[in-house]
Image (cartoon, rainbow, N blue to C red):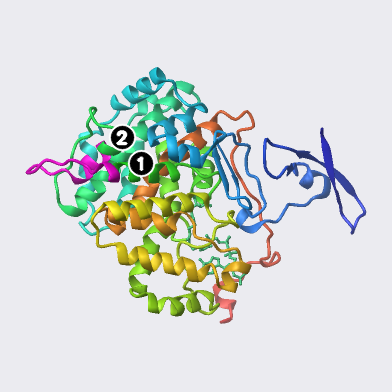
């Protein structure tokens, strides 16, 4: 059933009927394309709080109900039954793969799980203590200087090949960031290992001793990657889409997504949570930090709390919280105190009126850092792990946009509040302001 929303300009009395478009789930959208032509006006929505920038069939989330679906499958069921590589296939192709399709997908990725030897030289330009996200941005951007034989973004085959190259090469680039920081030799990707085992091997294996990843660690990391794979039109995905809408090189678009994800209000929060828990140090200090989080004059925010969309518990945080419990019981780690502080902080915050009335719940970043720490992954690498997982979502969203018949360059407008037109004043006649 099609219907419209009437927008009336009370100054002129002019009215326009804007079509309303309904999706499978979620809020319908008002098509305001005609607003400027008919009323000479733009919509005004800083931070895109209520703006649908595109149509998408990849992910659906309901912030009130705490629902997250990937291609219609609830995140809880994917977390329980799937694996990250299968979720990559699902995000890219829209369906769960048959056994043969999954094997072909893996074989295809294995054909692309090396990077040009020259790329290794880019790492040497970074100090050993450079933040790994600064390295990952540069190296991923450098990927756009390769593969020119298959970068016709109007060619569906080139686009699919690029998507597979991103998924196959991101774990290599990410693991090399860690090896560079440790001063250890880079480890090649191996075809005989699963996606997560291969990544952990590239991270932690050393020439002088065998490396066998802990099964619990493999499962925990695979789950973490699933939970971070895609999340609708978040800030970094929107950056990838906007860059891609200008027909930029897709590897450069992924690098742009990594740049945005690094912000501590976004993917940088997992690292910020661990640093905050370390700063709290003792549960007796929690009330001081809660007080600071509520103080408008204090820039401190409770990292890992709040979300632009989830005004209920982030379903991913619920899943991660349980894995934290299981992992910390299984893996001998010194991180139990950190986890205890996190649990007590969560408990106190969720009873505090300030957090309740603002619907500030733990988000995916609140517990993920604790799992990564328990897996022996250094804090500075946490957002790299987020970028690794989200690269599948970013490239899937890029593909969907490039295939959209409504594809066009993104170009938001503004409300101009600057000076009125004025004439140039020669330097000799200017007065100090
Ligand atoms: C991710 O978009 C996505 O999907 C992102 C993500 C994904 O998978 O891609 O889910 C991943 O980025 C999760 C979010 C990780 N970030 C953090 O944990 C950083 C801490 N959180 C805040 O920075 C904040 O909650 C945001 C940025 C996440 C959301 O910001 P909003 O929606 O713009 O919220 P807001 O700033 O309008 O806050 C509303 C109120 C304000 O108080 P009042 O002005 O109403 O009095 O809530 C307060 C804020 O001051 N508030 C917080 C708070 N978050 C919001 N107060 C203390 N601590 C916080 N964490």
Q: Position of residue 218 (x, y in %)?
A: 29, 42
- From this viewpoint, is residue 264 visible? yes
Crowd rating for badge 2 (residues with CA inside 10 Å; few <14, some 14–19, many 20+): many
In the image, which disc is placed on residue 195?
A: 2
> Which SS class for mark 1?
helix
User: Which quadrant of the picture is home to ligand 1?
Assistant: bottom right
Q: Residues under labels 1 and 2: Cα distance?
A: 8 Å
Q: Position of residue 147 (x, y in %)?
A: 34, 29
Badge 2 marks a residue whose secondary structure is helix
Is 68 situated above or below 164? below
| Residue 131 visible from this viewpoint | no
Is 81 inside the magenta-drawn segment?
A: no
For the point 45% across and 27% down, which residue is it? 159
Magenta stretch bounds: 198-217
Q: Nearer the viewer, residue 241 or 248?
A: 241
Task: State the residue lying farthest toward the right.
Answer: 13
Q: Marks 2 and 1: in contact by CB < 8 Å?
A: yes
Q: Which residue is mark 1?
A: 222
Q: Nearer the viewer, residue 76 or 208?
A: 76
The reply, left or right, for residue 135 in relation to residue 85 is left
Residue 408 placement: quadrant? top right
- List x then y, in percent, for residue 90: 47, 30
Q: Judge whether residue 206 is colored magenta.
A: yes
* The N terminus - image quarter: top right
Residue farthest toward the left in the current orientation of the protein: 208
């Amino acid at each position: 059933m099609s219907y419209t929303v009437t927008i009336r300009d009370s100054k002129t009395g002019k009215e326009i009927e804007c079509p309303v478009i309904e999706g499978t789930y979620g809020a319908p959208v008002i098509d305001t394309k005609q607003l400027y032509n008919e009323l000479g006006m733009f919509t005004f929505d800083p931070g895109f709080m209520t703006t649908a920038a595109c149509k998408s069939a990849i992910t659906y989330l309901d912030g009130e109900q705490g629902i997250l679906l990937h291609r219609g499958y609830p995140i809880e069921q994917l977390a329980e039954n799937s694996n990250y590589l299968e979720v990559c296939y699902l995000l890219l192709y829209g369906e769960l793969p048959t056994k043969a399709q999954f094997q072909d997908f893996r074989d295809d990725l294995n054909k692309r799980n090396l990077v040009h030897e020259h790329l290794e030289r880019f790492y040497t330009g970074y100090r050993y203590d450079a933040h790994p996200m600064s390295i990952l941005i540069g190296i991923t951007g450098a990927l756009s200087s390769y593969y020119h034989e298959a970068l016709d973004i109007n060619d569906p085959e080139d686009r699919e090949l690029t998507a597979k190259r991103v998924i196959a090469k991101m774990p290599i680039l990410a693991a090399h960031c860690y090896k560079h920081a440790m001063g250890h030799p880079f480890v090649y990707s191996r075809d005989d290992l699963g996606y997560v085992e291969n990544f952990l091997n590239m991270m932690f294996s050393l020439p002088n001793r065998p490396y066998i990843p802990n099964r619990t660690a493999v499962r925990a990391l695979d789950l973490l990657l699933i939970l971070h794979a895609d999340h609708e039109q978040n800030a970094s995905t929107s950056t990838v889409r906007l860059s891609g809408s200008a027909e930029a090189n897709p590897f450069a678009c992924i690098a742009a997504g990594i740049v945005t994800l690094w912000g501590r209000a976004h993917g940088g929060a997992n690292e910020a949570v661990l640093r905050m828990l370390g700063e709290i140090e003792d549960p007796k200090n929690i009330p001081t930090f809660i007080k600071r989080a509520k103080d408008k004059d204090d820039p401190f925010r409770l990292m890992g709390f709040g979300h632009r969309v989830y005004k209920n518990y982030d379903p991913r945080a619920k899943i991660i919280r349980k894995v934290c419990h299981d992992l910390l019981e299984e893996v001998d780690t010194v991180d139990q105190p950190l986890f205890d502080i996190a649990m007590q902080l969560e408990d106190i915050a969720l009873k505090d009126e300030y957090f309740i009335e603002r619907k500030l719940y733990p988000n995916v970043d609140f517990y993920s850092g604790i799992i990564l720490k328990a897996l022996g992954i250094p804090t500075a690498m946490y957002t790299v792990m987020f970028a690794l997982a989200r690269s599948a979502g970013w490239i899937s969203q890029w593909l969907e946009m490039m295939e959209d018949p409504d594809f066009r360059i993104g170009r938001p407008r503004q409300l101009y509040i600057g000076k009125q037109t004025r004439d140039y004043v020669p330097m000799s006649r200017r007065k100090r302001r």
